[in-house]
Image (cartoon, rainbow, N blue to C red):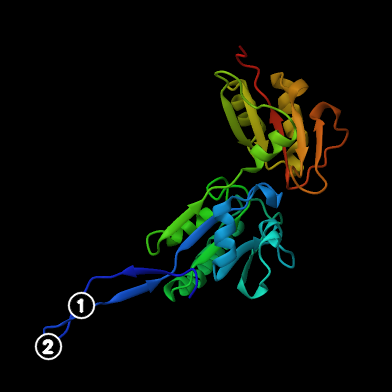
Amino acid sequence: MEGSVRIDAPVETTDSGGETPAVAKTGTLYGVGMGPGDPDFLTVKAMRVLEHAPVLVHFCKRGKRGNARTIADAVVCDPTREFPLAYPYTTELHPDHPEYVAALAGFYDEAAGRLADHLGAGRDVAILSEGDPFFYGSFMHLWRRLKDRFPVEVIPGVTGMSGCWTRAGTPITWGDDVLTILPATLPRAALVERMKGTDAAVIMKLGRHLPKVRGVLAETGFLARAVYVERGTMAGERVVPLAEKEDDVAPYFSMVLVPGEGRRP
């Protein structure tokens, strides 16, 4: 099958003394970085995999298409290759809730089993990952379950934060600035401590945590240079100084950038 991989297994010896090559046919698991939203940021290698992989996996909310799959519309025209994986929960429960943890573990176990069937049959599987596959990505949970059984290739992508600071026209680090990447889901005290020890920051996973983040930045003296970016590189993009943002509404695809002010020759 197009896009499949053949891996040579050890040679088996027949009873007659002759040798019969035993070839294990397996597919490759690809983690494909889809970039921050604008399909023009897809890499050439990502495009090649999207064009040829027999199985295209994308995570999504029940009844909706995932953003990574939407980006792939620029390349993918064959719906028969699609393999959606709908999360059992998204925002219904807190990520630390035992029911949430158990449901997600079962979800990834079951998904890995289904993908293993395709890989074992010699079909390549491409998991579409927003941004970069190894940066806060769901791909990592399947990679961890499958990496010791099948060949894997991870194709890096432009991260959401890189797309956002580029679209905001905001260099994020200068000279020896230290950059800290923070999930807004951390407790307020932890965010304050981290911000006090850094020169620049990217704060992700805003959602309902935006009021907390705004307060932390005011307390630590960073509010004046914080920039709010919503849907960076996508349709409906919005860039505004956080201090000028009048409401506390922040959709999933949003983040706060705090640029450094380091050495500038």
Helix, strand, or loop for circle 2? loop
Is 92 placed left or right of 13 in the picture? right
Q: Which residue lies furthest to the left in this view?
A: 17
Q: Residue 104: which quarter of the image?
A: bottom right
The residue identified by callout 2 is 16
Is 133 placed left or right of 205 in the picture? left
Graded by Cα atoms within 10 Å as few (under 14), some (14 to 19) or many (20 or more), the crowding at tag 1 reads few
User: Residue 121: in sight, yes or no?
Assistant: yes
Q: Callout 1, which amino acid? A: Glu
Determine whether 41 is above or below 218 in the image: below
Is 216 placed left or right of 125 in the picture? right
Determine whether 78 is above or below 139 in the image: below
Q: Horizontal and vertical percent for residue 172?
A: 65, 27
Residues 58 and 80: in front is 80
Q: Horizontal and vertical percent for residue 228?
A: 77, 34
Which residue is at 69% across, 33% downward?
Answer: 165
Q: Horizontal and vertical percent for residue 201?
A: 64, 29
Determine whether 249 is above or below 202 in the image: below
Q: Could you tell me if the residues under marks 1 and 2 are in contact, i.e. CB atoms within 8 Å? A: no
Kindly identify which numbered label has been placed on residue 12: 1
Which residue is at 64% across, 48% downward?
Answer: 35
Graded by Cα atoms within 10 Å as few (under 14), some (14 to 19) or many (20 or more), the crowding at tag 2 reads few
Which residue is at 56% across, 59% downward?
Answer: 48
Helix, strand, or loop for circle 1? strand
